[in-house]
Amino acid sequence: MSTTTEIVLPGLVEPHELRTTQRELPEPGTGQAIVRVEATGVSFAEQQMRRGKYYDQPAFPFVPGYDLVGTVESLGPGTDPALRGRRVAALTKTGGWATRVLLDAADLVPIPEGLDPAAAETFVVNGITAWQMLHRYAKVRAGQTILVHGANGGVGSTLVQLARLAGVQVIGTASARNAEAVAALGATPVDYRGDVTAQVRALAPNGVDAVFDHVGGPGIVDSFRLLAPGGTLIAYGSASTKNEAGNSRLPVLTLFARLTLWNALPNKRSAHFYNIWADRRRLAAFRTRLATDLTAVLDLAASGALHAQIAARFPLTAAGEALTLAESRTVTGKVVLVPQAD
């Protein structure tokens, strides 16, 4: 049997109160694989989960970790033997903060040769999210202009790069200290602490063709109003409510209701909520779509067209420090955990 070291989120605790545990993994069953983790990330989801604010998080205690990159160590019956020894990526939602994980082999997506595991990790949940919002939901076209909130973040920095590769002009909100980093990605920075509406209107007087908003809350109204006729709002979170007390589902349900109302109005604009797990009930189609989109992003990264934004690397056992840094809102890109093999 294989041993794994895991980082456990025991309850509503501060980052330094995460726990490190060890346990034995069972042998992989039919269709399963054990993956030795080489990189996993600290995404906004874990920041919400620590507060009990992620929409459908499991009951405490549990192991966080929304995605990972690693090498297949062993396989169960009914799996492709060619996977053994392959570097792969997986979207896990939870469980990734570990040195080894047991996963369904059908959820593993091969990584291009030569791509650094930490670099690849920054494009798993972030890359899938950005690619699908741009190309499957907003269906951006060359020559259009979009607004990306949090353009210095993990998803935001990937959105900016993918949009620029598609010939789209990007306005990106960020703090003043991150403006230079946002500009380096190819976006026009806007200080989110100022009058965002006025700043965006000055750059796009007729409105923007799409807005990508992870903030939610009252500000979502301004995002919708900034759309040009025919424009699309893609909401994919409620970051502004992460510190609010109360039911974790209420902010998301309120957002759903607002988007539904806007779509019912004859305003020639559309609004959507993006959920990476949508249509998972049609599992085969979900896996195919995810693998197709992630492969497209990873191929761009392997070719050098897309650049990983690694804010910092921490050992797995320093997950508390990594989470603290990610929550500081001072970084560009994604904080990555690099487990050491047991």
Image (cartoon, rainbow, N blue to C red):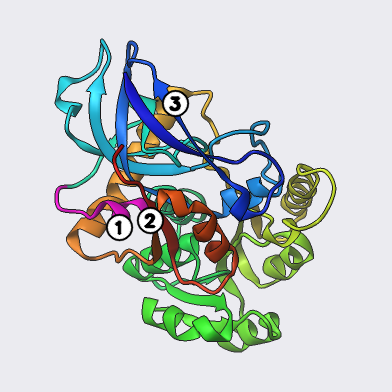
- Residue drawn at (25%, 57%), measured in percent from left and top? 300
Q: Is residue 327 above or below residue 78?
A: below
Tell which residue pokes out farthest to the bottom in this image.
202
Q: Amino acid at mark 3?
A: Arg
**Residue 201 drawn at (x, y percent):** 64, 84
Q: Amino acid at mark 2?
A: Thr
Residue 135 among magenta residues: no
Circle 3 SS class = strand
**Residue 152 visible, this angle:** yes
Residue 122: mark in rendering = 2
Q: Is residue 70 above or below residue 1?
A: below
Q: Is residue 165 above or below residue 38?
A: below
Q: Amino acid at mark 1?
A: Ala
Lower sequence index among marks 1 and 3: 3
- Magenta stretch in the rendered image: 113-122
For disc 1, the marked residue is 119
**Residue 68 drawn at (x, y percent):** 38, 43
- Residue drawn at (76%, 65%), measured in percent from left and top? 221
- Residue drawn at (53%, 36%), measured in percent from left and top? 63
**Residue 204 visible, this angle:** no
Lower sequence index among marks 2 and 3: 3
Tell me, yes or no, whether the two marked residues, 1 and 2, touch with CB atoms within 8 Å.
yes
Q: CA distance from mark 1 to mark 3?
A: 28 Å
Residue 114 among magenta residues: yes
For disc 3, the marked residue is 23
Residue 254: mark in rendering = none
**Residue 96 drawn at (x, y percent):** 44, 39
> Viewer-proximal residue, 230 or 302?
302
